[in-house]
Amino acid sequence: MNVIILGNNKLSIEVTRIVLSEKDVSPLIILNDNDLGLEENRFSLKRFAREQNLFAIQPKSVNAQSVLDSLARFQPSLMISCSYARILKEPAISVVKKRCI
């Protein structure tokens, strides 16, 4: 199952850990554009994804057509947004086969 996880902070890291604990799950991490992954004393999904060797993208806009095309090719069954800094418009939400949380 392909799962998109969007966000930053401790909540998104914990959700990603739970998703990774499931069998046959391929996550795609979409990072907030302000997550630099550098600050040691803050929770950073970018740093976590890098440490776990997860595929992550950091688009300026998740609603851009090029990003939407990439998301559609990924064929996600589930999208989970955890403190994502941008508003997801209908085209971004509609690429998900089953659920968007």
Image (tube, helix red, strand yellow):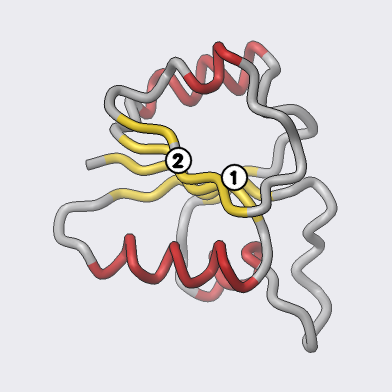
Instruction: Report the disc number at residue 101.
Output: 2
Q: Quadrant of residue 66?
A: top right
What mark, if any, has residue 30 been given in the picture? 1
Q: Residue at x 61, y 43 (%)?
A: 57
Q: Disc 2 vs disc 1: which is toward the camera?
A: 2
Numbered marks: total: 2
Asked whether the residues under the numbered discs 2 and 1 touch, taking CB atoms below 8 Å apart as contact, a structural biologist would say no
Q: Nearer the viewer, residue 54 or 77?
A: 77
- Residue at point 24% right, 52% down? 25
Outermost residue, left direction?
23
The N terminus: image quadrant: top left
User: Which badge, 2 or 1, comes first in the chain's sequence?
Assistant: 1
Q: Position of residue 48 (x, y in %)?
A: 57, 72
Q: Is residue 55 above or below residue 95?
A: below
Mark identifier at residue 1: none
| Amino acid type for the residue under numbered disc 1 | Ile
Residue ID at (45%, 40%) = 101
